[in-house]
Image (spheres, rainbow, N blue to C red):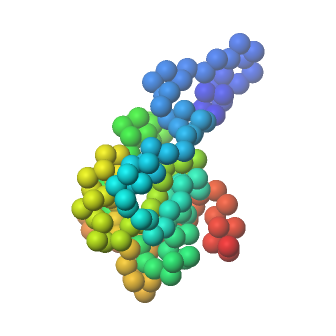
Amino acid sequence: EREKAVYKGETDFSPDFAGHEYILERQLKPEARKDIIEKLRLAGIQLTAMMDISDGLSSELLHIAHASKVGIRIYDDKLPIDYQTAAMAEEFNMNLSTAALNGGEDYELLFTVPLSRLDDIQQIEGIHLIGHITNEADGNVLVTRDGTEITLVAQGWNTAQALNE
């Protein structure tokens, strides 16, 4: 959109996406993470909840919390964010955590496992522990790098519909 605005009206417009191939591909051609599912299967890990992240991490976390009647506590410094994504957020003067929590369509997997399998999960390459399940009364929060707790709010696509399901 930025490139389009800069070259508005030019007939031979061709945006320069050099260096942004990774994030464009993640957005335009997302791939299901079958590799992670296979690693979990081989490790014999039974998941307690799982969904792909298509409407944003916050939205999907709230789906799990609502459906399971639990609270969720995630940590800002544990969110796995690719360098190119961080660089693009900086270029557009966007808060990286906000982008990570509310972006979507990347089809990464969000799942929960029993606490007894924590050590096993941490041994699997490509899986990132971002938080844990709490009591429903504890709410759904993001803990920032300075320890501030922020209530999770779904701001991704179809938020109103998602919360009413």
Task: Identify the residue shown where x is 42% and y is 54%.
Answer: 41
Q: Quadrant of the N terminus?
A: top right
What x and y, as percent, mark residue 66?
A: 55, 77
Residue 157 vertical position relative to residue 35 in the rendered view, above or below: below
Examine the rendering and report whether any part of residue 79 can be seen.
no
What x and y, as percent, mark residue 67?
A: 56, 76
What x and y, as percent, mark residue 161?
A: 69, 67
Q: Nearer the viewer, residue 54 or 4?
A: 54
Left or right side of 163 for 106: left
Q: Nearer the viewer, residue 61 or 3?
A: 61
Task: Identify the residue shown where x is 61% and y is 36%.
Answer: 28
Residue 160, quarter of the rendered image: bottom right
Residue 123 vertical position relative to residue 93 in the rendered view, above or below: below
Task: Identify the residue shown where x is 65% and y is 67%.
Answer: 162
Residue 121, quarter of the rendered image: bottom left
Residue 10 vertical position relative to residue 107 in the rendered view, above or below: above
Task: Identify the residue shown where x is 57% and y is 40%.
Answer: 30
Examine the rendering and report whether any part of residue 162 can be seen.
yes
Left or right side of 89 for 119: left
Q: Quadrant of the C terminus?
A: bottom right
